[in-house]
């Protein structure tokens, strides 16, 4: 079954080891999910504890003097100009900045009936991040994955065998898991997807479509 | 008179408590002799006091003490991650200067000083060495789902977080804390850790899940 536990990815992100697509998904997940932030704060505190315990390294004998000298001149930290985002965006900022004109203006393309995907400029050569939309009441046919797949719900909700995933929830799957996420009837389900490879449809007839799925 | 431009040999981390700093010249400050502040063996609560002095009074003597404790550890952290000596020295100074600049934003209710400085060092390293801004979340974002309101009587305890989390870390079984060290100090994602150790990915994920579970429970006991 898919799992909603993303702890290993929280560790990656807290440690600074997460690559761009996973980092984007985790940052967005944390903006939307107060419960996940509790685990994350504990992990950042762990980072502080590890820093305290590390063997101190020798520093240059004029290091303090240099830093103190800098405190004399009013060096202002440049406030990062927030990139403009579409008004009333329901997307947390890190993601909204990647779609400054709103997600409707992204290049959406059909994957299979009722399911669309839009590319985001975020990849690390191994995994990429995309937006996924499952039309209200529709489902992605039963499929497994050829690697990691993480799905963060941004709007609406979907259900699979493991339960209901709503805004702020993360669904983690891989090549050992087959599922058929179904969007609720009330509204389209929009998700942020991080995946290492295209899905592999597993239904007896659906699998014939695998070579034709866009990538 | 110090010449800040001439390269100096490295010196040990424990000089700072008794170091007489003299910065002479027009418009510069001069400190001399021992400082009557908590010793360098000070713990987390003293570090909070130092940051608050820096924030409130621009207290450079307090900063020097904080520097004496954290600069060698920040540099040690950067070296552990494979940064070369000169870059680690520069980045460490950049981190400590950021500590000075951002002291007024430090909130003892949110985290201990070591945690705060760890996050500055982590982010600075990513920004500079990966030349990519780390994606962040922030509470002022309209899309941010706010925390449930904190219980007021818990707020006072948060200053002691740093000591408590250190105890929680020490209680983790080695097979869990070893994985955390690889993540924080070797810059390895959990799938890279599995590959490095030759462990099944599921094993690494479940050990990390157990570690996170224990840290989270211990942490929320305290807060």
Image: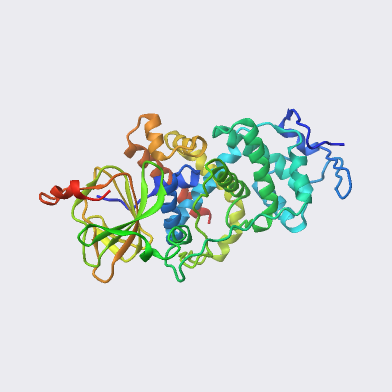
A31 relative position to B7: left or right = left
| Above or below for A135 versus B186 | below
Compared with A173, B188 (above or below) is above
| Rendered image quadrant of residue A127 | top left
In-image side of B128 versus A37 (left or right): right
Q: Examine the image and state in which quarter residue A80 appears.
A: bottom right
Q: Nearer the viewer, residue A165 or B95?
A: B95
Q: Coloring scheme of the render?
A: rainbow
- Visible residue check, residue A201: no
Q: Position of residue B32 (x, y in %)?
A: 87, 42
- Percent x, y of residue A46: 52, 44
Residue B25 vertical position relative to residue A38 in the rendered view, above or below: above
Q: Quadrant where the N terminus of chain B lies? A: top right
The answer to whether residue B4 shows anywhere in this view is yes
For image coordinates 47% across by 57% down, the residue present is: A94
Q: Quadrant of residue B198?
A: top left
Nearer-the-camera pick, A79 or B70: A79
Residue for point 48% across, 49% down: B218
Image coordinates of residue B212 in percent, x first then y, are 43, 46
- Relative depth, front residue between A206 and B12: A206
């Amino acid at each position: 079954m898919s799992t909603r536990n993303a702890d290993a990815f929280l560790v990656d992100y807290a440690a600074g080891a997460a690559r761009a697509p996973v980092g984007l998904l985790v940052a967005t997940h944390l903006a939307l999910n107060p419960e996940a932030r509790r685990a994350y704060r504990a992990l950042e505190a762990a980072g502080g504890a590890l820093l305290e315990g590390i063997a101190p390294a020798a520093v240059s004998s004029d290091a303090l003097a240099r830093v103190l000298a800098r405190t004399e001149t009013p060096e202002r930290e440049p406030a990062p100009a927030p990139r403009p985002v579409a008004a009333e965006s329901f997307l947390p900022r890190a993601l909204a900045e990647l779609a400054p004109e709103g997600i409707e203006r992204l290049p959406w393309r059909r994957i299979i009936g009722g399911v669309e995907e839009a590319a985001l400029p975020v990849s690390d050569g191994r995994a990429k991040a995309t937006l996924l939309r499952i039309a209200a009441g529709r489902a992605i046919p039963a499929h497994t994955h050829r690697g990691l797949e993480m799905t963060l719900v941004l709007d609406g909700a979907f259900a699979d065998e493991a339960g209901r995933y709503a805004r702020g929830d993360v669904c983690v799957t891989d090549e050992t898991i087959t599922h058929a996420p179904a969007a609720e009837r009330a509204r389209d389900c929009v998700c942020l997807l991080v995946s290492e490879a295209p899905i592999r449809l597993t239904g007896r007839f659906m699998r014939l479509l695998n070579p034709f799925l866009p990538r | 008179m110090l010449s800040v431009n001439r390269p100096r040999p490295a010196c040990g981390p424990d000089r700072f408590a008794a170091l007489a700093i003299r910065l002479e010249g027009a418009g510069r400050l001069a400190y001399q002799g021992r400082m009557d502040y908590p010793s360098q063996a000070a713990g987390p609560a003293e570090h909070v006091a130092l940051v608050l002095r820096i924030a409130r009074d621009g207290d450079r003597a307090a900063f020097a003490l904080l520097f004496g404790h954290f600069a060698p550890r920040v540099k040690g952290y950067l070296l552990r991650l494979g940064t070369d000596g000169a870059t680690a020295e520069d980045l460490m100074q950049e981190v400590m200067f950021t500590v000075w600049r951002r002291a007024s934003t430090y909130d003892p209710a949110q985290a201990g000083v070591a945690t705060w400085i760890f996050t500055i060092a982590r982010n600075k390293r990513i920004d500079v060495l990966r030349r990519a801004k780390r994606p962040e979340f922030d509470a002022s974002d309209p899309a941010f789902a706010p925390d449930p309101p904190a219980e007021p009587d818990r707020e006072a305890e948060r200053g002691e977080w740093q000591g408590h989390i250190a105890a929680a870390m020490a209680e983790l079984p080695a097979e869990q804390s070893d994985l955390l060290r690889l993540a924080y100090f070797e810059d390895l994602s959990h799938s890279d850790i599995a590959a490095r150790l030759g462990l099944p990915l599921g094993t690494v994920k479940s050990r990390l899940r157990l570690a996170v579970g224990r840290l989270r429970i211990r942490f929320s006991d305290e807060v």
